Amino acid sequence: MTQSIRLIGIDPGLRRTGWGVIDCRGTGISYIADGTETSDAQLSLAERLLQLHERLAAVLGEWQPDEAAVEQTFVNKGASSTLKLGHARGIALLVPAQSGILVAEYAPNLVKKSVVGVGHADKAQIRAMVGVLLPRCQPDSEDSADALAVAITHAHHRGRRELARQIEAAG
């Protein structure tokens, strides 16, 4: 029998960070949980990043994922927005790494293509397909739906990543 692997997908953002947890057994996936963590806009950047760190650490502590996947940064219109997203993304990469969890990264277009079938899908299409692929879930936000899409993408691509890692280690 194939062992179940618990995966967490993270859609980072300074205002809202979505997360979604699924179990993967062979080619099958099942919904476990999702949520959205917010930071207090009245606090300093450092305090908001600390909030995000503490809240993601609590999520990982509660759901005990075996692997994590984080959506890569895309360039926003404003440099300041892109930089803030980069800070939040750094926390999203750091928290699972601190727990000794393998962290994979996926480009937004690959996530959309993996879940919807096209690389330029909108958030409503992503949310709808996440609902089709994980019928028991009702994401609490677009951010958590995106995070579940990241987890689904990792479930589909993790075998290739593991094979590539083994080949690289062997040779």
Image (cartoon, grey):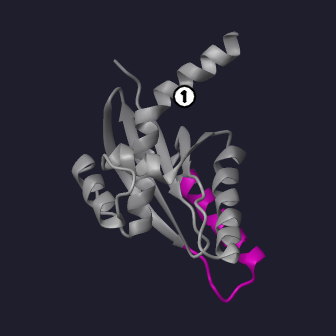
- Image quarter for residue 92? bottom right
How far across and how far down the image is residue 31, in percent? 33, 48
Look at the image and tell me in which quarter the N terminus lies.
top left
Foreground residue among 140 and 163: 163
* Residue 153 placement, left or right of 62: left
Which residue position is annotated with label 1? 161
The answer to whether 19 is drawn above or below residue 141 in the figure is above
The answer to whether 15 is drawn above or below residue 31 in the figure is below
Determine if the magenta segment contains residue 27.
no
Which residue is rendered at x = 65% and y = 75% of the image? 81
* Residue 95 placement, left or right of 140: right
The answer to whether 20 is drawn above or below residue 105 in the figure is below
Q: Amino acid at mark 1?
A: Arg
How far across and how far down the image is residue 128, in percent? 25, 59
Which residue is rendered at x = 58% and y = 53% of the image? 72
Which residue is rendered at x = 38% and y = 70% of the image? 141
* Residue 56 placement, left or right of 90: left
How far across and how far down the image is residue 11, in percent? 52, 59
Foreground residue among 107 and 127: 107
Determine if the magenta segment contains residue 42.
yes
* Residue 73 placement, left or right of 80: left
What is the chief secondary structure element of the magenta stretch? helix
How far across and how far down the image is residue 104, in percent? 58, 41
Foreground residue among 2 and 142: 142
- Image quarter for residue 12? bottom right
Dot 1 alpha-carbon crowd within 10 angstroms: few under 14, some 14 to 19, many 20 or more: few
- As drawn, the residue found furthest toward the bottom would be 42
Say what secondary structure mark 1 lies in. helix
- The residue segment tinted magenta is 38-60
